[in-house]
Amino acid sequence: MSILIIQPEDLAPAGEITTALKMAGEHYTVFRMEENTILPKEINKYEALIILGGSMGAYDDSDFPFLTEIKSAILNFYRSNKPILGICLGAQLICSAYKKAVRKMEKPEFGMMKLRKTEEGKSDPLFRNLPDIFSFMEWHEDYFELPEKAVRLATGSKCKNQAFRIGDYIYGFQFHPEVNKTILESWVKEKKNWILQQDSNFIEKMDGLVKGELSSSKRYCHQIIYEWLKLVQERRAYGSSKPL
C-alpha cells in the first residue's frame, strides 16, 4: 500500500494534490468520511498519510468519532517514521494530537492570502524552491498553537502559524494548496452567502483570481507535493530505521 488520503468532508477534496500524485505516478487511496464512520482497519499498512480539511473542529470528536482515530493514527505514523501531511483541519488535528490548543479566530480567514517563508522555511525541502512571498487560498475559523517539536515554515499577517514541520516527515499547512477552479466554484455554489459575508466582491474577482494567483498556487502545490513524495521515497529506502 502507498498513500492514504483522509477526506473528512466532500466539500474539501484533494484537488491539485491528487493531480500532482497522478503526474508523479504515485499510488494513493482517498477515504471519504461522509461515506464511512471509521477509518480503514489496515491504516497502519499505508506508507504515508494526507489529512484534508473540513468544517468540523479539532475537538468535535463526540459528533465525529473518526477525529479521535485520526489523532491516534497521527501519533502511530510519527512513531513509525511515516510521512504525514495535514491540510487545514488536518494540521489542526496534528497539533491537537500533540496536546496543543486549537482556538477560534476573532474573524475567519478567507480568500487568497499572501504568506511569507520564515528563515527555517527558506531551507526546508518543501518550501525552499517557493518564492519568499507566495499566495494560497485560505478558509478557516480556527488557528493552532505549535507543538514544542515543531518548526514554523511560513507565516501570515492574520494568522502567524501557516505551515510547520515536526522532525523530518510531519508537515501541517493552515492554508489550502489543493484548491483549483473546480473546488473554488463548488465552494461558491454551496456557501455563497457565507462567502459574500466575508468578501462582498469575491465572486466578481474570481475570474482574475483563477487566472492569476490561483494559477501560481497550483504550480506551488505541485512543487510541494513532489518534494513531499521524495520523503515518502526516502522512508521506503530507510524503512523504520531512520532515527526520529
Image (cartoon, helix red, strand yellow):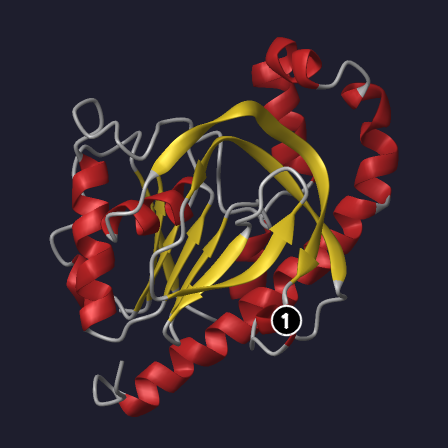
Check the picture and name the quadrant holding the C terminus.
Answer: bottom left
202 shown above or below 38: above
103 shown above or below 40: above
Q: Which residue is at 50% across, 47% downward?
A: 14
Secondary element type, mark 1: helix
The residue singled out by tag 1 in the image is: 119
Q: Which image quadrant is residue 131 in?
A: bottom right
Q: Which residue is at 72% across, 60% downward?
A: 219
Q: Which image quadrant is residue 89 in?
A: top left
Outermost residue toward the left? 41
Is residue 38 at all visible to an observer of this figure?
yes
Q: Position of residue 162 (x, y in %)?
A: 55, 50
Is residue 22 at all visible to an observer of this figure?
no
Q: Which image quadrant is residue 60 in?
A: top left
Give the amino acid at mark 1: Glu
Q: Is residue 194 left or right of residue 41?
A: right
Viewer-proximal residue, 209 or 182?
A: 209
Q: Position of residue 16 (x, y in %)?
A: 59, 52
Q: Which residue is at 72% across, 38% downward?
A: 112
